[in-house]
Each structure stands twice: as C-alpha cells, then as structure tokens.
Image (cartoon, grey):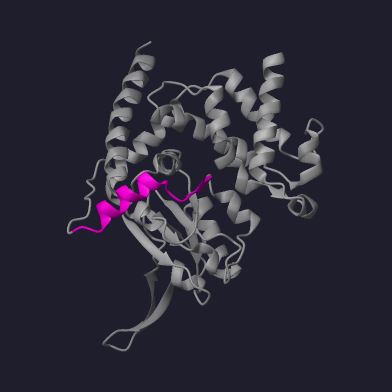
Amino acid sequence: MAKAENLVADIENLGKKLAQAKSSITNRFIGQERVVNLTLSALLCGGHGLLVGLPGLGKTRLVDALSTVMGLDGSRIQFTPDLMPADILGSEVLDETPDGKRAFRFIQGPVFCQLLLADEINRASPRTQSALLQAMQEHQVSIAGVERPLGAPFHVLATQNPIEQEGTYPLPEAQLDRFLVQIDVEYPDRQTERDIILATTGIEDSEVSQVFTAQELLEAQDILRRIPVGDSVVDLILDLVRACRPDDENAPDIVRENVSWGAGPRAAQALMMMVRAAALLDGRLAPSPDDVLDMARPVLKHRMALSFAARARGQTLEGVIDAVAAQVLKSEAAT
C-alpha cells in the first residue's frame, strides 16, 4: 500500500512540474498545445521525436525552448547534402607533443550531448543519416573501434521538411522506426498566427525558464514506467498494432488493400509508453482506451507505408489508421 501511495504522490508532483514546463514552453511556442504535448511525451518516454512540417513553423524554436525548460545540454546540427558522418560523431586527429611524440586525440562531435536537434534531417544523404542509427538506439557510438557513451539522458528531436520538396532524401525505414513518435506541425489558425506575430516582432521576446534538471527528467522517466496499464488498454494496443500489418490473419481489408508493410513490435512498445505519457500530462493516474486512439496516428504513421496503387487512389495513412482504430474499437466493444 505504501508503494502505491508513494507512486500516486510521485505522479501528482510530476504532473505539477509538467504543467509548469508546458506553460513555459507555450509562452515561446504559441498555440500548438498538441505539438508541445507530443514532444514532451517523447522525452518522458525516453525516446526520440520526428517533427514534420514546412519551414518557418517554429520547429527549431520549440526544440530550443525545450532544451532550456528541461535543463538539458543541447546541441544542433544543420543537415545539408554535403554533411559527413564525422561532422556528427566526431573524429580522431593526430597530435604531436613538443618532444616529438605523436598520438591520436578524439574530438567529440555535436552528438555528444543530451538533446540533439537534427535540423532538416532529410536534406542529408542516407549515409550521413545512418550515422545517427546507433546513437539513437544504443545511446553510444563506435568510432575507430572504440565504443563511446553519449549523454544521459540522450534524445534526438529531428525536423523534417515534407518529402515532396526538392533536395530531400527519404529517411530509411530502420531510422524512422527509431523515432518514438512523428509530430506533424501544421499551419496555425488565424488567431494563433496573430498572437505569434504580436509576441515575436516587438522589442522583447518571450523568455523561458528552467523547470527540470537532467536528473529530474531521468526520474520522471522512471515514474512513467511505473504507471499501471489495464489489461483492456494493453489488449487494445496489441489489437490495433497487429491489425495494421497486411500479412496478419486478422488484418482488415483496408489494410490488406492499401498497406505494403506495417508496424512492428517496436510500435506496440512505443504506443504503450505514449499512452502513459498522455495520461500523465492530463493529470490522470492511468491511461484509458481513448489515449490509445489519440496516440495511434503519431506512433504508427511513420512505421507504415502505402502501396503504390493506394497512393495513386489518393489513400492516406491517416485514413487507414483511423479506419482500423474504429474497427478495432468496435470489435472490442462487441466482445
């Protein structure tokens, strides 16, 4: 009983700090509460986030505010077509001492931080993009045969321009799967855009203040993993993810007819973590089926691919995911 009471107290205290963090971030990144929630959720889950949207929508501004509020050592890489893996990871240089001795010295790259902003990640070549794979999965990199650990915590928040734009490369499927969640940044509505231009074109810009430390974020991640998830929510997660695989025996027709490949077990893990974060940010002690439906698109969209015929028909992954979620929920209700 004492452990349960301590967990409730920990969740409530963490909820208050998260409310402060959200308030501070939204002072600088105005009118995009869902984007802020999803980004914070990615950090609470210990994962990485992929922010997708056109240039000029404030993605870099958001990550900069997040680094300050969460008390993380931040670093930024502007991805360009000529960027090389060594520009991200670092490299060894040959030093010569005054007495003539020579030795290699490792110079750390910008990946050695706690919060890495990979700006316009899809403008770099696939070879350079793949340099982040080991870092994102294992929180360490291997350089010249030596494994070098990264910061703790370590998170990547990458911004990506829509792939239709010239000069972009699609991210490899293996790297997309490393992102816990895809966060779509849309155009603001008229009132929000009005608030943005009034807040950002004056003499003073909105300030953000630190709310968390790196250690407190690690502790928050531990609390999140202790949040209980009911059997009904776990079953809904499994049914939804498995129904999004075209070769699954229970996959609905809309998936078989439109999806070339679906989400793997890592998607179910991500959905399990994200529903906990959604409940935590909403001030609840446990996730609900509504959280599963709400997190389905951000977690599954970048882990699935439409067939060529489906794209030609104008089908969208959002439409497929929504249809599958509605069908799964109906089946759950019937049983």
Q: Is residue 97 left or right of residue 311?
A: left
| Residue 13 x/y as whole percent | 29, 26
Image coords of residue 186 (percent x, y):
48, 49
Q: Residue furthest left?
A: 203
Image coordinates for residue 188, horizontal then vertical, percent: 42, 48
- Identify the magenta region: 181-202
Q: Does residue 116 appear to the left or right of 249 in the view shown?
A: left
Give the residue drawn at x 59%, y 18%: 231
Res 175 → quadrant: bottom right
Q: Residue furthest top?
A: 1
* Magenta-span inclusion, residue 172: no
Residue 290 position (above or below residue 268): above
Viewer-proximal residue among 181 and 62: 62
Query: Magenta stretch containing residue 184, yes or no?
Result: yes
Q: Residue at horizontal 41%, vertical 39%? A: 37
Quadrant the N terminus occupies? top left
At a point 34% along the width and 13% down the height, the residue shown is 2
Residue 205 pos. (x, y %): 22, 55
Which of the image's four quarters has the C terminus?
top right
Mark yes or no: residue 213 visible.
no
**So how many labels did they put on this image?**
0
Vertically, is 161 above or below 229? below
